[in-house]
Amino acid sequence: MPDRGAAPPGAYAIELRGICKSFGAVRANHDIHMAVPRGTIHGIIGENGAGKSTLMSILYGFYRPDAGQVLIDGRAVAITGSQDAIRAGIGMVFQHFKLVPNFTVLENVILGAEDGPLLRPSLSRARAELRRLATEYGLQVDPDTPVQDLSVGHRQRVEILKALYRRANILILDEPTGVLTPPEADHLFRILRGLRDEGKTIILITHKLREIMEATDNVSVIRQGRVVATMPTQATTPEALAELMVGRKVLLNVDKRPATPGSPVLELRGLRMVDRDGVERLRGIDLTIRRGEILGLAGVSGNGQTQLLEILGGFPRNGARLSGEVLLNSQPLPLSGRGSDAGARRRAGIGHVPEDRQSEGLIMDFTAWENSVFGYHRQQRGALMDSAAIRRDTAARMERFDIRPRDALLPARSFSGGNQQKQVIAREIERNPDLLLIGQPTRGVDIGAIEFIHKRIVELRDAGKAILLVSVELDEIRALSDRIAVIFDGRIMGERDPATTTATDLGCLMAGMDPADVTGAAPLPPERKPAADRAEAAP
Amino acid sequence: MEPLPRWADMVLTPLISVLLAFAISALVILAIGENPWEALKVMVAGALGSSYGWGFTLYYATNFVFTGLAVSVAYHAGLFNIGGEGQAVLGGLGVALACLFIPWPHWSLALIGAGAAGALFGAAWALIPAILQARRGSHIVITTIMFNFIAAALLNHMLVNVLRPTGSMDPATRAFPPATHLPTLSQMAAGLGLDWGRHTPANVSLFVAVLACVLVWLLIWRTRLGYEIRAFGKSEPAALYAGISPTRITVLAMLISGGLAGLMAVNNVMGEAERLVLNAVEGAGFIGIAVALMGRNHPLGVALAALLFGFLYQGGGTLALFTQIPRELITVIQALVILFTGALDNMVRMPLARLFALHRKRGA
């Protein structure tokens, strides 16, 4: 492999000189300098809120920088809108795809790039072009399939094709693997390497260390709006990158003793759920979680995890039909009617850290003290709330959980993601539940807080509680769990011991394949789609 | 962008909005060839320049406090109750029935009893749209609007066919018995030896309105129910997560809201007319929406906004009496106030926020 780290001056596809951008008092980007050599894959890594997305939005013309210059192929350009960016040869693949679900691939590709008022000439030109791109870069997609019938991985390919069709020489991908299974991600990286070898320049934005190591030639680390390092990927390690991201050493592994599971706390027997549209989201779940044990539920999001958490937490979606049995401490829990609401579940001893803290776990306009009793606000008697006592408790809790700033009167939205999540976790853990449901405990949370949250979860386990952990972060599941169950399309595909399983093994299960069936070469992404995508694509 | 400081949000934005509305109104008055400064002087003199003017201003404001509180309680639950008008109409019916058919020994007991009846009728009228919303998903804005028309028709029927004294040509009930007559503020002032606001309708209901403000404040910010109402209004998924039943909150919030609108009848029906007439509510239900918007759904804000609209009502009447400016202009001014405080809120808020951000930057 040639050394792509060094490039002669003038050979840069993109050069950023002193880019600054502030939002109010927040410096999102501060004096950013970055040079991306042509024909390389350049990784940009940083924590959530470090300024990655702002930088890319400047490149794509969504924001104007307060100061600084953007050079494309050595020429200074003013990018004031996405049309300028496209003219300059920049193509963007967004985290959330911008595709019309009921249009075919071909129609999506020409959308906004039609040659004239009549579609036919554009379509036939696009068809020929797609055929060329498919053979050249391995970007096979059937041009006549409606996008809603494609798997997530294929939809992403359509986004890439859209950019290439617009003659993009520079591709920017924002967190492209967030929605992909590991095999799909591998396939994406193969495509990206192919594009690079054809001379395209690729910018890959991610907060996943593994992807940087696997896919990029050079990497820039952004911390608090500044570029703190740029170097060839081969010259660094994941640990070094992580340290640069947060500015200090971080334990990537969770420190924990082996589990000593006791009696079963939660038993699921043949749990099924059909949603209001008649789609079967859970197809007979059997699971047992014991005292003093963390069960990690791995899977690509949209395979039934959300529904499972909502049912156990006591708030299944409207119109859902449930069947099967749920036992808590050997007592059956009602699945509908009286005693099945979230309040009753809390009284029964189930704590719940929901997947989406901003729309479920917290009321963003409520103060920290108001949020500190959210869901438990009926557990004292009397019509009036004792706000003074709650405020005192909240202040003490903020101390224990190192929630910053320590101001119980601030609304939730004024706290950072990590400090919001700590408030939710603190509230649920300190009620000392028998069973704690945790969805995406560290989504959008900085590394320092992740470490803290993980530690607390393990402490709860060691106190003899049962924990159901749902996360799309495989690394998190592997680090925390005592046992891993993999869910795909509403079914448990298998259980694994985290000490002995591998990422490939779990990846196969997450993609709905039995690893025993897969031999030799890396598996291709599944054509079969989980139920969530079908519903998502529906108008 | 950073949010405004609380005081700026609560005080400065509504104030600027009102000033803008007044400025445009001034232009309109100029355009019809009158002097806006003179017009303002007439309005102030008419509404605030004498105890007589105050007596009317406070009477109108009392009505608007009730309907404004009604809209804001529902609003905290994320429900837009446009049905204050109809609920106040039904409240009037409840008050009238209680006053006419129960022999009250004293006005104070009558006030409590008739007030309860008015609140009950108003709450019942809000209950149907609430249940339709909670159980069937029928949008409460649509149903409450339609219930306004049904309320008007129902009142028409009751007055023409049921409650009208035989031989009367007037679609109204007979006068309430004297024991139910509420003391006016001027009578109360006279009791203290003061000559204040003779021949004005402001009455003891004003204190009921003030009490309602305090109770609503307690309800929304101090009780568990208020906490649940606010949580549900901010985020329904979060309410479900917290075990708060959407049906329960929708129904309770609408019952309270309708009850407050119905309670208005102690002022206009019992305190002023002392009988039930067809057009007793006079649009106060709709003004309540503007009052709640402008008062930021806070009882104190509602009270202040109600005073402003009371001033506009009374001042507008004087304006029509003493100048060539038609009475309809007051509707224009009210509409402008609603437009600026409600619909164009961000037009004032955004530049203000930018100004504050700039100021902070300099200060830092």
Image: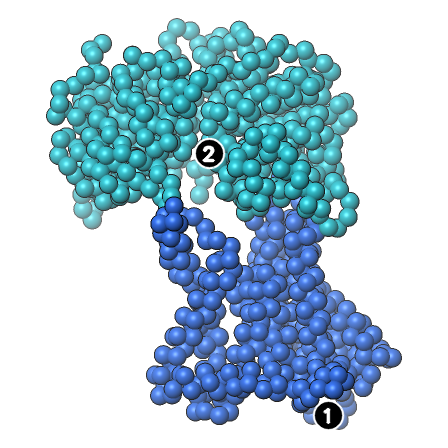
Chain colours: A cyan, B blue
Q: Closer to the observer: label 1 or label 2?
A: 1
> Which residue is located at x 72 percent, y 83 percent?
B189
Q: Secondary structure at mark 1?
A: loop
> Which residue is located at x 33 percent, y 42 percent?
A22
Query: In this rendering, would A117 be left or right of A470?
Result: left
> Where is residue B285 drawn, in percent x and y?
60, 71
Residue A371 drawn above or below residue B279: above
> Which residue is located at x 70 percent, y 82 percent?
B185
Return the residue at label 2.
A534
Residue A342 drawn above or below residue B225: above
Return the residue at label 1.
B168
Amino acid carrying mark 1 in the image: Ser
Residue A10 drawn above or below residue B172: above
Image quarter for residue A390?
Answer: top right
How many neighbours does mark 2 have within 10 angstroms: few (below 14), some (14-19), or many (20 or more)? Answer: some
> Where is residue B133 drawn, in percent x and y?
62, 55
